[in-house]
Image (cartoon, rainbow, N blue to C red):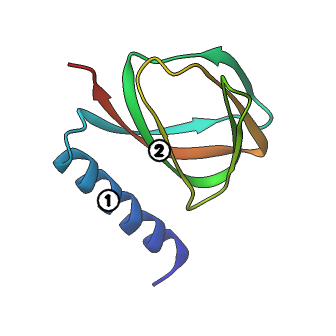
């Protein structure tokens, strides 16, 4: 099985588990090279899986996660964070779950 098929299978498994686990939706996000997103938060829980490129996720407490393909992250609704993307940009799948 080639790399593209492996990634597709992993993404489909991620989608299935997320929806079965209560996620409202699963979307693919693509970010431009070297893009920076200043500190913000979301009104939903987010669980992500990086599939290409790299990103740095900076939490409000100053902790930085350097994420590469295969790495996951989790952000509860309302969590302040900033994002920075690598020289190739980044792609990740994210499961969003509304706060009820």
Residue drawn at x 41%, y 34% as measured from the top left: 46
Residue 7 vs residue 57, the one in the foreground: 57
Residue 94 vs residue 59, the one in the foreground: 59
Q: Residue furthest bottom?
A: 1
Residue drawn at x 58%, y 19% as measured from the top left: 80
User: Which type of secondary structure does the marked residue at label 1 adopt?
Assistant: helix
Q: Whole-percent x and y of residue 24? A: 23, 32
Q: Which residue is mark 1?
A: 12
Residue drawn at x 32%, y 59% as measured from the top left: 12
Q: Which mark is residue 48?
A: 2
Q: Is 18 on the left-hand or right-hand side of 95?
A: left
Q: Name the mark nearer the viewer: 2 or 1.
A: 2
Q: Which mark is residue 66?
A: none
Q: Earlier in the sequence, mark 2 or mark 1?
A: 1
Q: Whole-percent x and y of residue 42? A: 46, 18
| Quadrant where the image shows the N terminus | bottom left
Residue drawn at x 27%, y 48% as measured from the top left: 18
Residue 78, compared with residue 16, is above or below; it is above
Q: How many marks?
A: 2
Residue 99, compared with residue 75, is above or below; it is above
Instruction: Report crowding for label 1: few under 14, some 14 to 19, many 20 or more residues within 10 A (C-alpha).
Output: some
Q: Whole-percent x and y of residue 75? A: 47, 33
Q: Is 34 on the left-hand or right-hand side of 6?
A: right
Instruction: Report crowding for label 2: few under 14, some 14 to 19, many 20 or more residues within 10 A (C-alpha).
Output: many
Residue 34, compared with residue 16, is above or below; it is above
User: Which type of secondary structure does the marked residue at label 2 adopt?
Assistant: strand
């Amino acid at each position: 099985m080639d790399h593209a098929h492996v990634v597709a299978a992993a993404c489909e498994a991620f989608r299935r588990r997320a929806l079965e686990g209560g996620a409202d939706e699963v979307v693919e996000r693509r970010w431009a090279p070297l893009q920076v997103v200043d500190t913000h938060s979301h009104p939903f829980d987010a669980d992500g899986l990086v599939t290409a490129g790299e990103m740095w996720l900076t939490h409000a407490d100053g902790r930085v996660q350097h994420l590469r393909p295969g790495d996951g992250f989790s952000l509860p609704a309302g969590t302040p964070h900033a994002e920075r993307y690598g020289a190739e940009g980044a792609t990740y799948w994210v499961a969003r779950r509304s706060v009820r």
